[in-house]
Image (cartoon, helix red, strand yellow):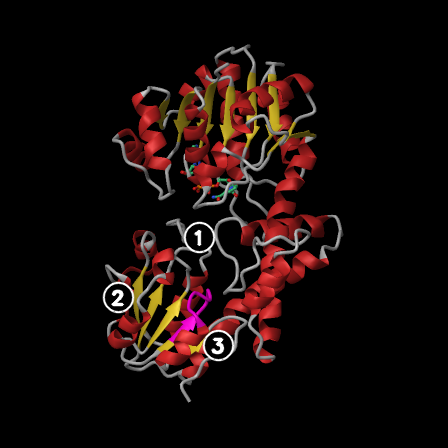
């Protein structure tokens, strides 16, 4: 069975979801208000970096299964299932801004009403939204239309940038929130090609689905903060946290994922979702102590790292060139939203450091923020030439495979602050580096 599907919002989530639904044989109309994005997509380009996306996108464009437009009415008119893949950025108080989701819902309902559409429409919210949002969407549907055949579903997205295509084609689970059994069946049919006969389709009520998404991200953020908290303790005890990680992660009750100590979590999801969950808990006086500490540890962790750099240089960066490897908030993406590298860059610019940066994919996005205040280099080796220190902010594979002897030759001083533990301590010692990493003993040439 194939469906006509509209996707409103063609960003990281919408573009990947839309492409993967086309891959399973559905007919897709993807909509975005960003005309430039639509023009790029229509001329065969891919506006984001996501491994594997270009290949399946091109194939489905060739097969006429996916099209891109800035005209939302085309999707409302033609599509039975309409996915909302819209931003839910944080408001200043930390709550999720539902403006995009609610405004688009109104647009859909107004169009349905004014064009007397009576066929079934299923509005599926894929954005990350606080508990009760489906009720707000339903209230708009009821207020704005007389069509009784409009249904609202909460279907949170769990993809991780960098693995988004792989995960969408073979999801670890699909969570669908609807209290309507018939609509639940339609959603199951839509996802059937991705389930591979495995029982990983979880049907629940809308509110549970909404909380599941926040709980999932906060739990993963908590694991990272746990390790980062422990990293300080390990450093002070001359213990290598990577050994500890291996020792605990091999226990199936713990598992190996999200246990890397580093400079804290960033990206467009964990920081904002943790904040939004906390905000929502405050509204009802439900204390989420562990989540609050998760956030506090994350904020402290990046500051601790920056302090290591600034205290090494005694806050004096005059005539100092600092190289930075990695700008994206994690490897295999060009996404720089809430990237820890940005906190490092801001702090060092404040102290007038001369910054030489390199990232395999995220330099264009970074230029939009920092312009000419930092210098961009075409390779990791170019960026470190004559540098007084190197700071590693993202664990791209090419950095892990760097020739450190070459690095030593190119740099003015053999000093590395590694926020991602990519280098071997023994090798750093042998080569005479000052090497400060996270949760591991300091390597010092003296
Ligand atoms: N990026 C992730 O890894 C990820 C993972 C899971 C969930 N989410 C959630 O999914 C949602 C979308 O995230 P994203 O990363 O794809 O965001 P994004 O910013 O990359 O994409 C959102 C898109 O919506 C478009 N848009 C805004 N208003 C519109 C309108 N009125 N009509 C049509 N298009 C409009 C924007 O131009 C943009 O292209 C958020 O709630 C996010 O928290 C994101």
The picture places residue 170, in percent across and down from the top left corner, at 51, 34
Q: Which mark is residue 307?
A: 3
Front-most of residues 98 and 42: 42
Q: Magenta residues? A: 416-424
Disc sitting over residue 381 in the figure:
2
Vertical order, 51 against 149 (above or below): below
Q: Which one is in front, 202 or 372?
A: 202
Q: Mark 1 to mark 3: distance in Å?
A: 22 Å
Residue drawn at 43 percent across, 83 percent down:
444
Would you say the residues marked 2 and 1 are in contact, meaning their CB atoms lie under 8 Å apart? no
Residue depth check, mark 2 versus mark 3: number of the one nearer the observer? 2
Question: Tag 1's secondary structure?
Answer: loop
The first of marks 1 and 3 along the sequence is: 3
**For residue 426, what is the image quadrant?**
bottom left
> Does residue 261 appear anywhere in the picture?
yes
Q: CA distance from mark 2 to mark 3?
A: 25 Å
**Residue indicated by mark 1:** 337
- Position of 253 compared to 245: left or right? right
User: Residue 314, image x and y in percent?
Assistant: 42, 85
Per the picture, the main secondary structure of the magenta-coloured stretch is loop
Query: Which quarter of the figure is the C terminus placed in?
Result: bottom left
Label 1 CB sits under 8 Å from any ligand 1 atom: yes
Which residue is at the front of the view, 30 or 358?
358
Q: Is residue 85 visible?
A: no
* Crowd around label 1: few <14 · some 14–19 · many ≥20 (10 Å): some
Question: In the rendered view, would you say 125 is above or below 318?
Answer: above
Q: Is residue 23 magenta?
A: no
**Residue located at (37% from left, 84% from top):** 316
Residue drawn at 56 percent across, 55 percent down: 258
Which callout, 2 or 1, points to the residue nearer the camera? 2
């Amino acid at each position: 069975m194939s469906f006509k599907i509209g996707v409103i919002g063609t960003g990281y989530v919408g573009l990947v979801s839309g492409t993967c639904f086309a891959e399973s044989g559905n007919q897709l109309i993807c909509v975005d208000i960003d005309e430039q994005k639509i023009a790029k997509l229509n001329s065969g380009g891919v506006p984001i970096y996501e491994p594997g996306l270009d290949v399946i996108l091109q194939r489905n464009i060739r097969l006429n299964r996916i099209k891109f437009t800035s005209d939302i009415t085309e999707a409302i008119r033609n599509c039975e299932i309409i996915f909302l893949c819209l931003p839910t950025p944080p408001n200043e108080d930390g709550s999720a801004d539902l403006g995009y989701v609610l405004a688009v819902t109104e647009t859909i309902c107004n169009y349905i009403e004014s064009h007397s559409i009576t066929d079934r429409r299923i509005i599926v919210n894929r954005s990350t939204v606080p508990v009760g949002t489906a009720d707000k969407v339903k209230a708009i549907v009821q207020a704005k239309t007389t069509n009784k055949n409009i249904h609202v579903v909460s279907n949170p997205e769990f993809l991780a940038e960098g693995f988004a295509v792989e995960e969408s084609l073979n999801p670890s689970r699909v969570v669908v929130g609807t209290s309507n059994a018939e609509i639940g069946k339609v959603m199951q049919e839509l996802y059937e090609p991705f389930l591979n006969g495995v029982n990983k389709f979880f049907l629940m009520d809308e509110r549970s689905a909404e909380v599941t998404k926040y709980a999932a991200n906060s739990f993963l953020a908590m694991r990272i903060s746990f390790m980062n908290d422990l990293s300080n303790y390990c450093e002070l005890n001359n213990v290598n946290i990577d050994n500890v990680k291996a020792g605990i992660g091999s226990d199936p009750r713990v598992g190996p994922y999200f246990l890397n100590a580093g400079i804290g979590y960033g990206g467009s999801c964990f920081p904002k979702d943790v904040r939004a969950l906390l905000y929502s808990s405050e509204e009802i006086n439900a204390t989420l102590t562990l989540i609050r500490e998760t956030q506090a540890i994350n904020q402290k962790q990046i500051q601790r790292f920056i302090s290591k750099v600034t205290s090494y240089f005694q806050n004096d960066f005059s005539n100092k060139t600092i190289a930075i490897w990695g700008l994206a908030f994690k490897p295999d993406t060009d996404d720089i939203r809430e990237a820890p590298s940005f906190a490092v860059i801001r702090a060092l610019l404040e102290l007038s450091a001369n910054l030489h940066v390199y990232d395999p994919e995220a330099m264009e996005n970074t230029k939009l923020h920092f312009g000419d205040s930092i210098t961009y280099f075409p390779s990791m080796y170019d960026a470190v030439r004559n540098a007084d220190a190197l700071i590693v902010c993202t664990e791209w594979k090419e950095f892990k495979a760097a020739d450190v002897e070459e690095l030593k030759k190119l740099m003015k001083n053999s000093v590395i602050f590694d926020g991602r533990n990519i280098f071997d301590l023994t090798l750093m010692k042998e080569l005479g580096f000052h090497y400060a990493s996270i949760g591991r003993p300091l390597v010092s040439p003296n």
